[in-house]
Amino acid sequence: MVYENLSGTIGNTPLVRLNKITEGLTGTYYAKVEAFNPGQSAKDRIAYYMVEQAEKKGLIKPGGTIVEATSGNTGFSIAMLSAIKGYKCILTLTSKASTEKISLLKSLGAEVIICPVDVSPEDPRSYYSRAEQIAKETPNAFYLAQNFNTDNAAAHYHSTGPEIWKQTEGKITHYVCCAGTGGTLSGVAKYLKEQNPAIRIIGIDAYGSVLKKFWETGIYDPNEIKPYKVEGLGKNIIPSNIDFSLIDEFIKVSDRDSAIRARELASKEGLLMGYSSGSAMHGIFQIQDELDENSVVVALFSDHGSRYLGKIYNDGWMTEQGYLLGNESETKVPSINEWEDHEHYYSYESVKRRYRTYYRIYRLMYRKYISQTKKSLGL
């Protein structure tokens, strides 16, 4: 098939059965592998749909600038589409973004602005505030605002949802998806619930995010906000794109468990997936008590693992975080049961490795504090 440009290849990603990693589990398991999109992530869908809708509404004019705050993947998709359509692209990212993502964005011609990760959304230094301000100050610019743009969820309602329903022949019983901006989760959930209200929607959140507690209580609690490593899920704001009424269960997954599961997907299934795909995979293991032999579980894997080679697929980084067992050169990834092994966790070598990591972190924090103090005193 011949396409006019790369955007024509977005969507219709494969549903891949999970075999070895789910061995011994009850039910049938599939992964919706969004890395097959040209930009290697599910964000291609929303970027294309949001830009197309903005063009139809006259919000973006020829030669204009698209501005967005992004964790990386949406930015890549926007940068790709901007190159195709002839727009300038300015992206704000947090300092948590991997170097691979930043390099990819710049290679597509995007201007990348890095913002601190440990500030409130209202802080003028946050990547949300910076994107909004840049859009206001830049002539002929449009801020996509994926967290609050309803075309985000609509993109998945019109594409990803119908694809999953068709690919499972309507047999899907559980949909597992990470919650970030909420578009992928809510858009697909809305379509699936319309086809069969009995389908259970499982949202995956990060420790350090406010989403799960808001779903449980309806209260935005800033005390929930803490730094976390995993990219592509969790928020320190409440995106209007998340329809919390569609979610049947919310599960929090740790940075460590997400990294371990992602590496297991690679070693057992040959699926080199992104960090959040490990989160979704671990979520499957958390819902085993509600599954039976007739269960058909679909987990959405958002992006490709090549963007995390310096992190979860790097043994040095994994060791620094305390995620690997044994010597620092050892590549073995522990199973969840091994992590719960009391004797290993409190072994001399394990404790020594963790304290060495903590010492390095505190030393960096101290240097940063001294540097900031000197700067404030004009020294």
Image (cartoon, rainbow, N blue to C red):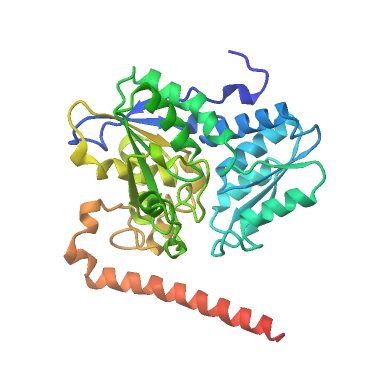
* The C terminus lies in quadrant: bottom right
Q: Residue, x 44% and y 21% (percent of image)? A: 162
Q: Is residue 302 above or below residue 127?
A: above
Which quadrant of the figure has residue 287? top left
| Image position of 65 (left or right of 50) | right
Q: Is residue 219 above or below residue 148?
A: below
Which quadrant of the figure has residue 323? bottom left
Query: Residue 168 location in percent, x, y?
Result: 34, 21
Query: Residue 187 location in percent, x, y?
Result: 47, 32
Q: Nearer the viewer, residue 2 or 243?
A: 243
Q: Residue, x 60% and y 39% (percent of image)? A: 149
Q: Residue, x 51% and y 24% (percent of image)? A: 158
**Does residue 264 show up?**
no
Query: Residue 105 location in percent, x, y?
Result: 64, 44
Which quadrant of the figure has residue 107? top right
Query: Residue 128 location in percent, x, y?
Result: 62, 53
